[in-house]
Image (spheres, rainbow, N blue to C red):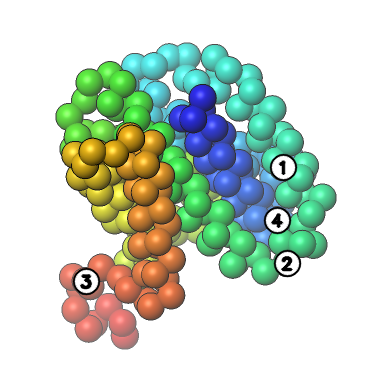
Amino acid sequence: MFYFVIDILGVIAFAISGVLVAMDKKLDLFGVFIIAFVTGVGGGTLRDLLIGNTPVLWMQQPFYIYTVIVTVIFAIVFRDKLKYLRTSLFLFDTIGIGLYTMVGIEKGLNIGLLPIMCISLGTITACFGGVIRDILCNEIPVIFSRKEIYATACIAGGVSYFLIRKLPLDNAYAYVAAILIIIGIRILAVKFKIALPNIYGSESNK
């Protein structure tokens, strides 16, 4: 039940980020729903295909589709409350990658994958819904932007999860701690403008 709740919270967070991007692009209602849907379940869909879990989860459990529908309605109704779109988008996107990284890692552990593979699966789960969202909205995906720490935060959180698991603590504490680490790294990286090294030299800034 704990992991199911985390999964649903991830869908909600990413769906809201999709709604915000779609509204920023002034898409119609159908466009808003499609962007919210692919953002909410896109990473999980790719994850399930990679591990051979078919039909993919949202086809097995319609609750995920209903969750996206309710989330879209909620976000549209309260769009005036989500006044600062960029701040809201960043917040929900950050929460989403934290939650979804751990969902992907848990899926990997359940089928006996090695930690490095679990972390990769978690990163894919967390990032690729946003990649699809940005591509459909004609934006450069955040994961490919050298200006932001994104996938790196997922990887760091995944590594921390496996390290914390070695401590004499309940696994749920390690799970929550890793989520908070991912969210914390992303927020601090943006706040203090921390980015990965630029491999192209000073000419790329001209």
Badge nearest the viewer, 2 or 4: 2
Q: Position of residue 11 (x, y in %)?
A: 56, 38
The disc, 3 or 4, on the residue closer to the chain's N-terminal end is 4
Residue 165 drawn above or below residue 134: above
The disc, 2 or 1, on the residue closer to the chain's N-terminal end is 1
Residue lying farthest to the front in this orientation: 168
Would residue 118 be found to the left or right of residue 68 on screen?
left
Mark 2: secondary structure: loop
Residue in the image at 61% along x and 37% along y: 37
Question: What kind of residue is marked 2?
Answer: Lys
Residue in the image at 56% along x and 39% along y: 9
Mark 1 — residue? 72
| Residues at marks 3 and 4, CA–CA distance in whole angstroms | 33 Å
Q: Position of residue 78 (x, y in %)?
A: 79, 54
Residue in the image at 21% along x and 42% along y: 167
Question: What kind of residue is marked 4?
Answer: Met
Q: Residues within 10 Å of mark 3 (few under 14, many from 20)?
A: few
| Residues at marks 2 and 4, CA–CA distance in whole angstroms | 11 Å
Q: Position of residue 69 (x, y in %)?
A: 71, 34
Would residue 156 be found to the left or right of residue 44 on screen?
left
| Residues at marks 4 and 1, CA–CA distance in whole angstroms | 11 Å
Mark 4 — residue? 23
Mark 4: secondary structure: helix
The reply to whether dot 2 and dot 1 touch (C-beta < 8 Å) is no
Mark 3: secondary structure: loop
The disc, 1 or 3, on the residue closer to the chain's N-terminal end is 1
| Residues at marks 2 and 1, CA–CA distance in whole angstroms | 16 Å
